[in-house]
Amino acid sequence: MASKSFELTVQDDNEDTMNVAVAGAIDLSCACDFDDALRRVERNAPGKLVLDLRRLDFMDSAGLSRLVALHTRCRRARRRLTLVRGPQAVERLLALARLDDEFDVIGDPSTAR
């Protein structure tokens, strides 16, 4: 098994919201591990999931595909997904894939609705 190059921190705010912060890199070598970690969070069935990308150093198309899969699962479960804006390289990847308007993206996690 490949070593994880990302770190996931989960905080439950006890108001039906799970706050998930990701740090490091999400690429082909760990995209499946990232997806598995997100699915474990989803098993808690939060009504709202806030994914904080501010400490993400790198994300390639494999990581992006996992975000799209998360978005799809959240929509199907009628769960609200909010992304906290990541570094410029991550934002650029979302824009190049024309997904920046598909996600609810905020700059400050305290403003998550």
Image: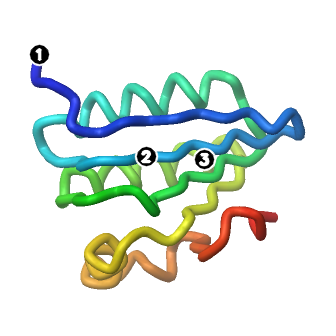
Q: Which mark is residue 56?
A: none
Of callouts 2 and 3, the N-terminal one = 2
Q: Which mark is residue 22?
A: 2
What crowding class fits label 2: few (fewer than 14 Cα within 10 Å), some (14-19), or many (20 or more)? many
Q: How is the image coloured?
A: rainbow
Q: Look at the image and tell me in which quarter the C terminus lies.
A: bottom right
User: What residue is pinned by disc 3?
Assistant: 74
- C-alpha gap between disc 3 and disc 1: 28 Å
Q: Nearer the viewer, residue 1 or 9?
A: 9
Q: Amino acid at mark 1?
A: Met
What crowding class fits label 1: few (fewer than 14 Cα within 10 Å), some (14-19), or many (20 or more)? few
User: What residue is pinned by disc 1?
Assistant: 1
For this orientation, the residue located farthest to the top is 1
Does the CB distance between marks 2 and 3 fall below 8 Å? no
SS of the residue under disc 2: strand
- Residue at 60% in and 47% down: 74
65 to 98, vertically: above or below: above
Of badges 3 and 1, nearer the viewer stands 1
SS of the residue under disc 1: loop
- In which quarter of the view is residue 92 placed? bottom left
